[in-house]
Image (cartoon, rainbow, N blue to C red):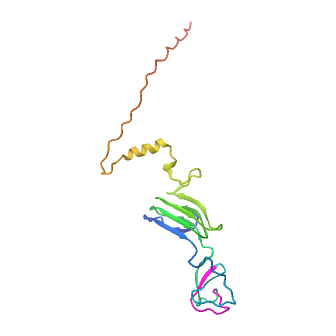
Amino acid sequence: MPGTLTAIDISHGTSAQTISQDLAPGVAGAPTYVSTSTYAIGDTVIEGGLAYTAVAAVTAGQDPANNPTLWKQIGTTTPAISGSIYFGSGGSTLRVDAGTVTGTVIDMGAGVNTLTVNGDVNTMVTGAVKDEGVPADPQCLGGHPERHQPQHHRRQKRQRRGHRNPAGVRRPRQQHQHQVRDYPAPPPSPPAPRSA
């Protein structure tokens, strides 16, 4: 889409695709960094919205932001994807367990698609969600164009495709019988008046 930021474009893929967004392991429940504390290798702390793990013994006052040789950044407390997302044609899964996904378009592509938002009150997805490149109809979940056509259009499509039995042999089409009713003939019209 012209003029919009694209965060992820995997639209040329034809196999199943999954994007999952969650907190990094160890981030949930990690304590806030305290400058008067010491930390052992492997301890995880939060400072400034970022999560860090100690890669060496840390003495008091060696904060993660200013001591990158002692700390490794492992994630954030608010993960985010900012920009449009375009999936391919093999069926797509977008799972958001923490943070936000914000894009002008979130095109789930073709196939069987799943969008799951499962987190705290700050976990959200915003943008125009599309299924198979067609905007989802707010009156009917899914957005699949064939689902929104009248029943007789779907029946015609199925008939054009034909029906096959499990052995792959084409069966003859079913003959539809229509009931013909005989109605009495309408009464004759009165003669037209003659002009003088």
In the rendered image of this protein, does residue 30 appear above or below residue 128? below
In the rendered image of this protein, does residue 27 appear above or below residue 84? below
The stretch in magenta equals 50-64
**Residue 55 included in the magenta stretch of the image:** yes
Query: Image quadrant for the C terminus?
Result: top right
Q: Which residue is found at the position 55% from the left and 10% from the top?
A: 193
In the rendered image of this protein, does residue 64 appear above or below residue 19? below
In the rendered image of this protein, does residue 146 appear above or below residue 100? above
- In this figure, what is the number of numbered marks? 0
Question: Which corner quadrant of the image does residue 41 belong to?
Answer: bottom right
**Residue 168 included in the magenta stretch of the image:** no
Q: Which residue is found at the position 52% from the left and 68% from the top?
A: 19
Question: Which corner quadrant of the image does residue 77 belong to?
Answer: bottom right
Q: Which residue is found at the position 33% from the left and 48% from the top?
A: 165
Query: Image quadrant for the N terminus?
Result: bottom right
Q: Residue furthest right?
A: 36
**10, 58: nearer the viewer:** 58
Whether residue 95 can be seen here: yes
**84, 140: nearer the viewer:** 140
> Where does the image place residue 133, in percent across and percent down from the top left?
51, 57
> Where does the image place residue 123, in percent across and percent down from the top left?
62, 67
> Where does the image place residue 79, in percent across and percent down from the top left?
60, 73
**121, 146: nearer the viewer:** 121
Whether residue 1 can be seen here: no
> Where does the image place residue 5, in percent across and percent down from the top left?
58, 67
**Chief secondary structure of the magenta portion:** loop
Q: Residue furthest top?
A: 196
